[in-house]
Image (spheres, rainbow, N blue to C red):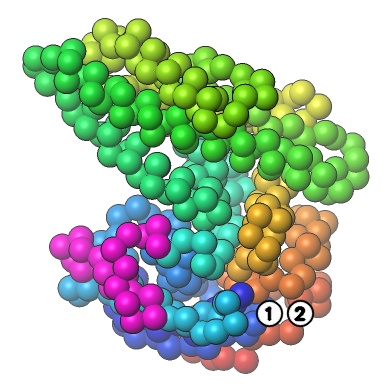
Amino acid sequence: MYIKRIELQDFRNYAKLEASFSEKVNIFIGNNAQGKTNLLEGIYMNAMARSFKTSKDKELIRFGREFCRVRITSFYDDDDHVTEIVINKDGRKGVKLDGVRINRTSELLDRIFIIVFSPEDMKIVKDEPEKRRRFIDRELCQVKPGYFSDLSNYKKVLKQRNTYLRESVIEPSILDIWDRELARYGAHIIVRRRQFIERIDKISREIHGRISGGRENLGLRYETSFDIPEEDGEKKESYLSHVEQAFYDMLVKRRKEDMENRSTGRGPHRDDLKISADDIDLRKFGSQGQQRTAALSLKLSEIRLIEEEMGEKPILLLDDVLSELDNDRQTYLINSLGGNQLFITTADISGKVAKNLPEGKIFKIKAGEVDIEI
């Protein structure tokens, strides 16, 4: 699995770009605001048909233009495949896979797997809960396409419920419709997230032990915003039903409070991931070094999970992340990525790091153009 070629038209600051890539390492060098991250955004579109930087598709269109186009050729399943995405200024988005239009983004999932490392990811431990939820959701959407559908439906119902809570007159029978729908989709999200964290906990604990030299024990726990039953060896369907009922009961109990606040106060949109080392909450009490080691362990565990779950080595996008790590963590990261196709953005790259990288291509990016290709 690797990306062979990209074509951009009026995408971010690129008027037109065509570039072919190495199967191993591709390094984009340039100053800030030249288009390095924009190029990674285009590559990421191949997996999710959306950016990892913004949820507003219209922001991807070059200023003053009516639409943008991303066309990517990838190799997987022993053949070349072409993904083409067109985003119009009015918000419409068209996606084609091998020339055939697809109607749902979920049809694009589980074909090619891409993991992003960004400076924001290195702050995931100390940042607000939304960042940790996004970390979980981004991974699950790739490995569990059904999760993407549940998450999209949950967000739609949540928006509808919150809109109704702002009405001057609220009928309990109508609110109950939203409550049951929210509980149905929310239960699927909670159960999948908990299962994901249980898997990631084991993998990241092992990786963290190696990075820290066995000095600390990393621990992850998914924290729900309301009490849910423990799984206790139940069949999946039974446990899912119990979580759904617990969610619905909580919504009914809190209706008066939600009506006063005019928003839904609890649910998976308020959940969090607790990250600790030797039972110390790293968000509150961890040093910067501890927080970054934990963040790196989480990101590396994503790679292992995809390899175990899907039998594929994901494509990795390292967006200026090397500058966020000291030499030891840089070396550990690079040494952990053998066999993966890498795309690395940086203002410069040290001789020590470059020496550890496999052979590949270096692109110099300037003002939305590939100025020099080595």
Residue 229 locus on image (x, y percent): 56, 17
First in sequence: mark 2 vs mark 1: 1
The magenta-colored residue range is 86-107
**In this rendering, would 61 be left or right of 357?**
left
Residue 252 locus on image (x, y percent): 32, 11
The alpha-carbon separation of the residues under discs 2 and 1 comes to 7 Å
Q: Which mark is residue 24?
A: 1
Is residue 143 in view?
Answer: yes
> Marks 1 and 2: in contact by CB < 8 Å?
yes
Residue drawn 38% across the image and 29% down it: 184
* Helix, strand or loop status at disc 2: loop
Vertical placement of residue 33 versus 367, above or below:
above
Vertical placement of residue 135 versus 354, above or below:
above
Report if residue 253 lies within the magenta region. no
**In this rendering, would 102 be left or right of 47?**
left
Residue 160 locus on image (x, y percent): 22, 32
Q: Amino acid at mark 1?
A: Lys
Q: Amino acid at mark 2?
A: Pro
Vertical placement of residue 98 versus 164, above or below:
below
- Closer-to-camera residue (191/264): 191
For the N terminus, the image quarter is bottom right
Residue placed under numbered mark 2 in the picture: 358
Quadrant position of residue 49: bottom left
Residue drawn 69% across the image and 32% down it: 220
Report if residue 105 lies within the magenta region. yes
